[in-house]
Image (spheres, rainbow, N blue to C red):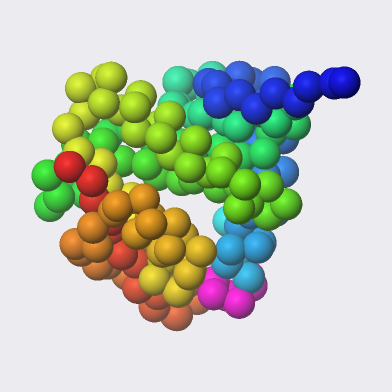
Amino acid sequence: MSQLTVEIRPASSRDAAQIADVHAASWQSAYAGLIPHKSLRGMIGRRHAGWWKRAIQRGTSVLVVDFGGAIAGYCTFGLNRARALPQEGEIYELYIRPEYQGIGVGSRLFNAARTDLRNHGCDGLVIWALEDNDMAMNFYAGHGGQDIAQGYETFEGQRLRKIAFVWQ
């Protein structure tokens, strides 16, 4: 009987192509119909393997879900960028390939990033999600996030509301 391992680990530059694939698949799944097509295609196109390789080499905090050698998801995180919010840590992105969603790897990745931020002295956590992204809204609310602030992103003249979830 063979055994499949699921590991949450820091990304290495050799993961860049797979992370780019996860980014493209998960963003297309999450945002098609929410973000205008031209903007979405441009945002996906900018995050090619070379972009991810450079980000990892520069020290960007990236964790991956390694599902038996295949990267099933990734998370980027660091210091909170919203000065108006007192939480010190922020998860910038957390995405799982659509075919791996709903089996708990997103929760494991979220918890690992949260632990890493706490271990680096960050008090509290914030995550922003587009209000119309029901899957993200349900995920963060289901993990105990408190909806405390709002903001907006504009794409091709279309204004989309985003919500800040926080954990103390």
Region rendered in magenta:
33-38
Q: Write down the quadrant of residue 53 in the picture.
A: top right
Q: Is residue 93 visible?
A: yes
- Quarter placement of the N terminus: top right
Q: Is residue 125 or residue 154 the one in the foreground?
A: 125
Q: Looking at the image, which residue is at 54% across and 75% down? A: 34
**Most distant residue in the right direction:** 1
Count numbered badges in the picture. 0
Q: Is residue 161 above or below residue 117?
A: below
Whether residue 11 is situated above or below residue 146 in the rendered picture: above
For residue 63, side relative to residue 20 (left or right): left
Residue at 34% over, 67% down: 162
The image position of residue 24, as x and y in percent, is: 68, 51
In the picture provided, is 32 more to the left or to the right than 167? right
Instruction: Pick the quarter of the image with the C terminus.
Output: top left
Q: Is residue 37 magenta?
A: yes
Q: Compared to 71, does 151 lie above or below?
A: below
Q: Does 23 appear in magenta?
A: no
Q: Quadrant of residue 37?
A: bottom right
Residue 23 visible in the current orientation: no
Q: Pick out the residue farthest to the front.
A: 1
Is 16 left, or right, of 116 in this rendering?
right
Q: Residue at x 63, y 70 (%)?
A: 32
Give the quadrant of residue 139.
bottom left
Q: Position of residue 85 (x, y in %)?
A: 15, 50
Residue 12 placement (x, y as % from top left): 61, 19
Find residue 123 and report its horizontal and vertical position in percent: 17, 32
Residue name at image x 67 percent, y 39 percent = 72
Q: Main secondary structure of the magenta part?
A: loop
